[in-house]
Amino acid sequence: MTHRDMIVIGGGPAGAATAIRAARLGINVTVFEKGDHGRDKVCGDGLTPRAVGALNDLEIELQEAHQIQGLRMIAGSKTRELDWPETSRFPAHGAVWPRRQLDAALMDAAATAGAELIYNTEVLPDVDADGRCIGVTTPDGKWTADLVVLAAGAQGKAARILGAERDPNEPFGLAIRTYAETPRHADRHIEACLTLQDENGVAVPGYGWLFPAGDGTVNIGCGALSTMKGFKSLNLNKLCDAYRDQMRDSWSLGPYLERPRAWRLPMSAQKRHGPGWVAVGDAAGLVNPMNGEGIDYGLETGMLIADLFNKDPVTATEQYDQLVAERFDSFLRTGRRFSFLIGHQAILRNGLRLAVGTDTIARITLQVMGNLIDSDTPGAAGRIMTVADKLLGIADPLLRRTRAAA
């Protein structure tokens, strides 16, 4: 039976970041990825300044990525374009980097660091009679590990084995994306339409995006939250078509370059750690409900568990859960509660216009959309999110009772 210090399930950004940091620390780590090297992952391809900061920490070169200096927000007839803010924690730029290239670069860095990478192999956690994860089951037999890191994205069978499924009482999202040619492919701002409507003019809690890739194309897509009325019958293809038709002239969009593809956005997890295992990134439900972004959280939590395991393998899982809770739980909880609020049509139609109504509020919206807020955020944005967490906490029972039927 093969043994490793650490086994990582999934070779996306969270899994690769775990492996890069672990291997550089001298930890014997293997990553199992069910796809090929350089496989595509359905995604908006946008990297927030927070994500760029994490990639810098991992020493990943971003020359191939298209640098983005800010965000253009559209709400009704109002458009506001802002640059990413200068902070002491994150760089003042983001990027757009198609996932085929980003994920390949991260896995290549993991291999260079000394991690073992095994592609085209799907594995599942192996849990003993005492409930401890002792390794993984592979097509060729069982491997054991001191720690198993679940980095397989949206929760599936592996998460169910560990009890790390999505909380059924919490919201989740669905998104769809494709690519189109545009002469504006080198635009330095990504664009988000916060007042998204379906083909029948019904307001959708979510947003439409256009993320210029700098290679002649733009990533175009939209996402919706499960708190809206009629969510179960929402046709994502028609939603994407309606958004494309709305933006075709302003971006001189060509036809779709590939069939639009949809994916699920987990925004909660019943557990993110247990004896012998932790979940990182999307697998831990670490997705911002207000923008659907999670790459930065995946990179950060991957590095975090590697550091903690290197410091003390015995306490690593509990320390991980505690530090993730301190850093992210308040903000993400506020986002989930906010999603119930904007699930009400009247609030959605009028409320999101306020997000860009004044320069002050728009700058806070910018920080929310850039994942720049957490428990360590200073200034007005941090204070407002703290107050919002308390107020929405009081309103939460009512919001859940009056939520629209999906």
Image (cartoon, rainbow, N blue to C red):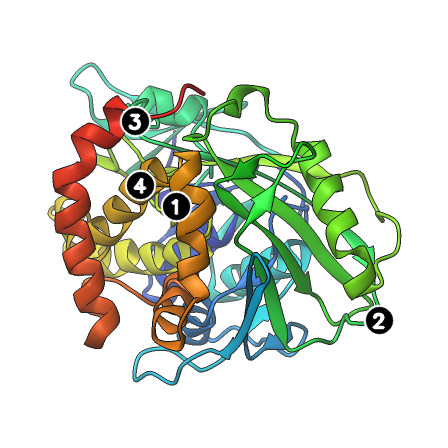
Report the Cα–Cα distance between label 2 and label 4.
Answer: 37 Å
Q: Give the structural element (helix, strand or loop) at label 4.
A: helix
Report the Cα–Cα distance between label 1 and label 3.
Answer: 14 Å
Closer to us: 9 or 90:
90
What residue is at 46 percent from the left and 53 percent from the top?
293
Closer to us: 19 or 378:
378
Give the residue at mark 1.
289
Report the Cα–Cα distance between label 3 and label 4.
Answer: 12 Å
Report the Cα–Cα distance between label 2 and label 1.
Answer: 31 Å
Instruction: Name the residue type under label 3.
Output: Asp
In the picture shown, does residue 181 fall above or below 165? below
Q: Which label's residue is closer to the chain start, 1 or 3? A: 3
Instruction: Name the residue type under label 4.
Output: Arg
Percent from the top left, x then y, of residue 165?
A: 34, 26
Query: Is the C-beta separation of discs 2 and 4 under 8 Å?
Result: no
Query: Is the C-beta separation of discs 4 and 1 under 8 Å?
Result: yes
Give the residue at mark 3.
167
Between disc 3 and disc 2, the foreground one is 2
